[in-house]
Amino acid sequence: MSFLAEKFIDHLEKNRGKVVFYTFGHELAGNECLTLIEEIRLFLQKHSIKSVAISSKNSIYWPIIYIASKISVKDVFVFDPNMPTNSLSETVKKFSIECIFSELDLSNGFDEERVDIQEKNLGNRILKGDSNDILFTSGTTAEPKGVVISEEAYCHVAYALIKKLKQIDTDLELLSMPFYHSFGLTRLRTLFLVGNCGFISDGLKNFPEIYKFSKLHPFTGLSLVPSAIVIIKRMLRSKARAFVTNVRYLEIGSSSISYDSRVWLKDNFLKAKIIHHYGMTECSRAFIRHRGLEDDFDVDNSWIGEPLDGCEYKIADGNKKGELLLKGKNLFTGYLQNELTEARMYGSWLKTGDVCSVENGIILLLGRIDNQINIGGEKVQAENIELIIESLPPVKGCICFSVDDDILGSKLTALVEVRKSCSTITDNDFKIQLDRTFKDYPPFYKPETITLVNKLPVTKNGKKIRDSSVLLESHNE
């Protein structure tokens, strides 16, 4: 049995009558959790199953199947439920996965007929030693990567977070982040280790119901991405204070936070411990920055914070600006694909793909290597230009990209979404603001053309679409 499963089951044994998990109109007490865990364990034992995968969105039963699996098998595969069927089938076959849990509804007890048991392929197991999670999630790329995270690594990160947030067993945390991504799964792991309660939701699409629940059972912990903060701000308005009054801690994902959101956090979370992390699936968390009342608005918003205990970092080739490299106790074991591990590792260092600079002893995140633009031999980071433009009061968002240029090879252009309250601003007024903003920057920093648009092209979860064909189509409309 893994250490994580042992800790959580010990908590359940001591709190059999206590509600552990809530969801919409349903809850699970410790004794119910133990019964379901035992049923699944016996099922896995009966079929001699040694390789399990979970492919499902968040549900109240997700943690039950996860813990039951970690009792019986060494490696638990976690799939993004949106993973294409052909990719899923190929992965299952390639890595000899024997059992897939995808329909996580155990309200009428465990029914093994709904479990997809594969024909056994008893080839050589790839992983040895420690208990592992293998996450097939897309992260910042489009391709699921098969990231191997040992129990030692994720417990190290979880304990560091518990210590910083002062998480205790009487807490009730809103768990809305996907468990098939590192952010949400790590939050769930802290619950297993501490033994507190969780309200499980698949995102915030039912937020009015979540708010109703919170009036009866106030949340003391939240975990949100910056875009979710915007949703809560918009939906709650004057009711925000009632929702966050009892919140003791909040962890925010790795995306940057707008100035408006930072002000909102500072004004509303008067007693909460708030941390904002930098990390990715391969290292979960690497740097932590404090927010809320402790937030210094004069510090560059691209500062990624202080390194997590046990995390080491450096800039590639000893430069002050370049790709950020990481290693330490928080780091993953590797990828299932050896060739990918070789491509992303530099000795014992993980190549993050993020471009950073070190200024006055702090690390600033400038953007992704993929988003560097070469302007006449000078490398410009698209995200850096966007932050400068987004600092202007009329601007809601910006996407900077390059187009071909006969002289310099490429030149900068940008799409800018203007706030509704500033929709009457003229192109000339905006140009004056832009000239004033870029006057202290090198001339190649300023985009040669800027097009004001009603809405930027973004994905369903609000991330900027950087596909050049989409951008050029929007640019030409």
Image: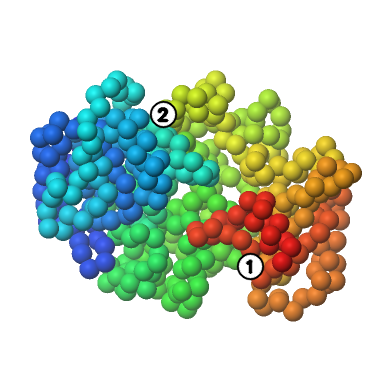
Q: Is residue 426 left or right of residue 198?
A: right
Instruction: From the image, tell me which residue sits under label 2.
Output: 336
For this orientation, the residue located farthest to the front is 86
Q: Residues within 10 Å of mark 1 (few under 14, many from 20)?
A: some
Quadrant of the rendering where the C terminus is positioned? bottom right
Q: Position of residue 286 (x, y in %)?
A: 50, 38
Quadrant of the rendering where the N terminus is positioned? top left
Mark 2 residue type: Leu
Q: CA distance from mark 2 to mark 1?
A: 39 Å
Give the residue drawn at x 23%, y 36%: 118
Q: Is residue 447 in view?
A: yes
Towards the viewer: 108 or 21:
108
Q: Position of residue 431 (x, y in %)?
A: 83, 66
Q: Is residue 154 in view?
A: no
Mark 1 residue type: Lys
Q: Dot 2: what SS? A: loop
Q: Dot 1: what SS? A: loop
N-term-proximal mark, 2 vs 1: 2
Q: Position of residue 31 (x, y in %)?
A: 11, 52
Colouring style: rainbow
Q: Is residue 290 left or right of residue 246?
A: right
Instruction: Determine whether 121 is above or below 137 in the image.
Output: above
Instruction: Determine whether 342 is above or below 436 in the image.
Output: above
Q: Is residue 449 left or right of residue 47?
A: right
Total residue callouts: 2
Give the residue drawn at x 12%, y 58%: 108
Q: What is the number of the mark on residue 455?
A: 1
Q: What is the number of the mark on residue 419?
A: none
Instruction: Determine whether 406 is above or below 129 in the image.
Output: below
